[in-house]
């Protein structure tokens, strides 16, 4: 589609007024495809904002079903969704909110085996997985395809996010030493989380995604940290490691 319908012009009227978006930008969003890995506390608001903004194709992958303990922070779901695959419930809600976009739910995990099919046609990957292994797999598979991705994580009252450029000039996730981290250190299930904290990180990921899709510059390789309870924020620029197993000069 090379233009917007009258209904779309009305739907996106407020963001079309922005010089950062305008008609050309809205068409860029409409032609974009984003993969969101995870349909939980980060994935729900991320996909809601992207669908609301008019991103034309959103693909979501997640292996889990909705549980009662999800509802305080994954507010797109209801008690009626308990036991339903998250991607099914989520894409159904998003489609009901915006019938003009393509929503694709995949029940499963992002890993080395599934990455090829999941990344086909994708412009940007957003990590909302709460899994260190998934992030390592995302980092490697997107590096091989020269795709950018946005990492996000939230636990207890704080979270972090970072944007990795397609060629990893500013370093990669493996540069953080993530391969040596113990997955058993615990995530939300073990340490807990305050619902709005997940939303806080997801909003930053959503904004970064829209900026990238619209062609605006991003801060690549900057680890942003925010504690919503203590009202603290910090940022550290990542340095590419020469000995990095993924993007290092020896590879």
Image (cartoon, rainbow, N blue to C red):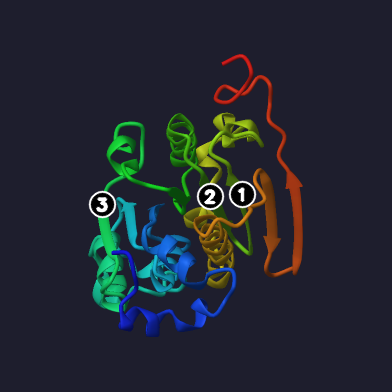
Nearest the viewer among 132 and 97 is 97
Nearest the viewer among 123 and 126 is 123
Regarding mark 2 in the picture, which secondary structure is present there? strand
Regarding mark 1 in the picture, which secondary structure is present there? strand
Residue 150 marker: 2
Residue 245 position within the rendered picture, expressed as x and y whole percent measured from the top left: 57, 22
Residue 37 lies, with reference to residue 42, above or below; the image says above
Res 51 quadrant in image: bottom left
Image point (65%, 19%), residue name: 243
Q: Kindly report which numbered mark, 3 or 2, lies closer to the viewer in this rendering.
A: 2
Which is nearer the N-term, disc 1 or disc 2?
A: 2
Residue 43 position within the rendered picture, expressed as x and y whole percent measured from the top left: 43, 60
Q: Are marks 1 and 2 in contact (CB under 8 Å)?
A: yes
Q: Are marks 3 and 1 in contact (CB under 8 Å)?
A: no
Going by the image, does 136 lie left or right of 120? right
Spatial CA distance of label 3 from label 2 is 19 Å
């Amino acid at each position: 589609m090379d233009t917007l319908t009258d209904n779309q012009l009305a739907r996106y009227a407020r963001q079309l007024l922005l010089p950062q978006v305008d008609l050309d930008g809205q068409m860029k969003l409409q032609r974009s495809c984003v993969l969101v890995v995870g349909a939980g506390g980060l994935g729900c608001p991320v996909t809601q904002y992207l669908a609301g903004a008019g991103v034309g194709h959103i693909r979501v992958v997640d292996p889990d079903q909705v549980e009662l303990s999800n509802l305080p922070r994954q507010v797109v779901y209801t008690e009626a969704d308990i036991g339903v695959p998250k991607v099914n419930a989520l894409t159904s809600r998003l489609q009901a909110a915006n019938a003009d976009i393509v929503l694709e739910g995949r029940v499963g995990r992002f890993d080395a085996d599934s990455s090829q099919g999941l990344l086909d046609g994708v412009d940007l990957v957003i990590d909302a997985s709460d899994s260190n292994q998934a992030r390592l797999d995302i980092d490697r598979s997107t590096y091989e395809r020269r795709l950018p991705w946005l990492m996000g994580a939230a636990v207890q009252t704080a979270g972090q996010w970072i944007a990795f450029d397609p060629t990893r000039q500013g370093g990669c996730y493996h540069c953080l030493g993530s391969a040596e981290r113990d997955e058993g250190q615990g995530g939300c299930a073990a340490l807990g989380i305050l619902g709005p904290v997940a939303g806080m990180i997801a909003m930053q990921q959503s904004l970064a995604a829209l900026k990238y899709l619209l062609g605006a510059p991003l801060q690549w390789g900057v680890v942003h940290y925010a504690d919503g309870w203590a009202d603290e924020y910090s940022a550290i620029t990542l340095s590419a490691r020469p000995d990095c197993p993924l993007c290092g000069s020896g590879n």
